[in-house]
Amino acid sequence: MFCTNCGKAIAPESKFCPDCGARQTAGLPLSQSMPVGPPAPAAAAMTVPAAAPSTSSPAGRPALWAGAAALVVALVGGVGYWGWSRTDDQIVRQLADEEQRRVAAERVAEAAEITAAQALLDKHIAVEEAEAQARARTSVQDQNKRTTVNR
Ligand SMILES: [Zn+2]
């Protein structure tokens, strides 16, 4: 047989041309010459990036790139799904933890708010009482001054 790339005579069983190193696809059955199709995704992923740039036939390139792109999409999708399903219950547990912590923090904040509001109210009441007492005292002490103080 002859090399499909440089045309030199080579051994009929050769997978690669000893002269130029091109992969020989013409003399081999399709299943052996095209490893991009059915084999396992891991093996295909390893062969596709190495094989794609070295392919010298321009006509076969778009189909090869399309195949490589589809494979990458499938791999990314698969890995993404795998990662998602693997960490799914971890995420659920984490979310539950976060929700619990959020509720606890909310309760603490609410309690703090209530105590703060109560303290404010107490202070307000105390101030009003003091004011009322002061006013009462003032009214007792000086009737005229009371009318100017009481706005
Ligand atoms: Zn050759």
Image (tube, grey):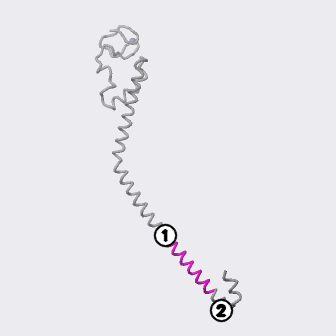
Give the image quadrant in which the ligand numbered 1 is located.
top left
* Badge 1 amino acid: Ala
Tell me the quarter of the picture where residue 97 sits. Answer: bottom left
Q: Does ligand 1 reach within 8 Å of label 1's beta carbon?
A: no
Q: Is residue 56 magenta?
A: no
Quadrant of residue 79 within the rendered picture: top left
Residue at which label 2 appears: 140
Task: Please tell me how crowded label 1 is: few (under 14), some (14-19), or many (20+) other residues with Cα within 10 Å.
Answer: few
Q: How many C-alpha atoms fall within 10 Å of the one at disc 2: few (<14), some, or many (≥20)?
A: few
Which quadrant of the view contains residue 4? Answer: top left
Q: Which residue shows up at 39% across the image and 32% down it? A: 72
Q: Give the residue drawn at x 49%, y 73%.
A: 115
Instruction: Please indicate whether residue 81 sits to the left or right of residue 112 in the image.
Output: left
Residue at image point 43% right, 23% down:
53
Determine the secondary structure under disc 1.
helix
Which mark's residue is nearer the viewer, 1 or 2?
Answer: 2
1 and 2 marks in contact (CB < 8 Å)? no
**Residue lying farthest top?**
9
The x, y position of residue 1, in whole percent, is 32, 9
Against 135, is 54 above or below? above
Dot 2: element:
helix
- Residue 130 in magenta stretch: yes
Residue 24, given in percent of the width and then of the height, sits at 35, 15
Q: Label 1, on which residue?
A: 112
The earlier-in-sequence mark between 1 and 2 is 1
Residue range corresponding to the magenta coloring: 115-134
What's the residue type where badge 2 is placed? Val
Number of marks in picture: 2
Front-lying residue, 125 or 32: 125
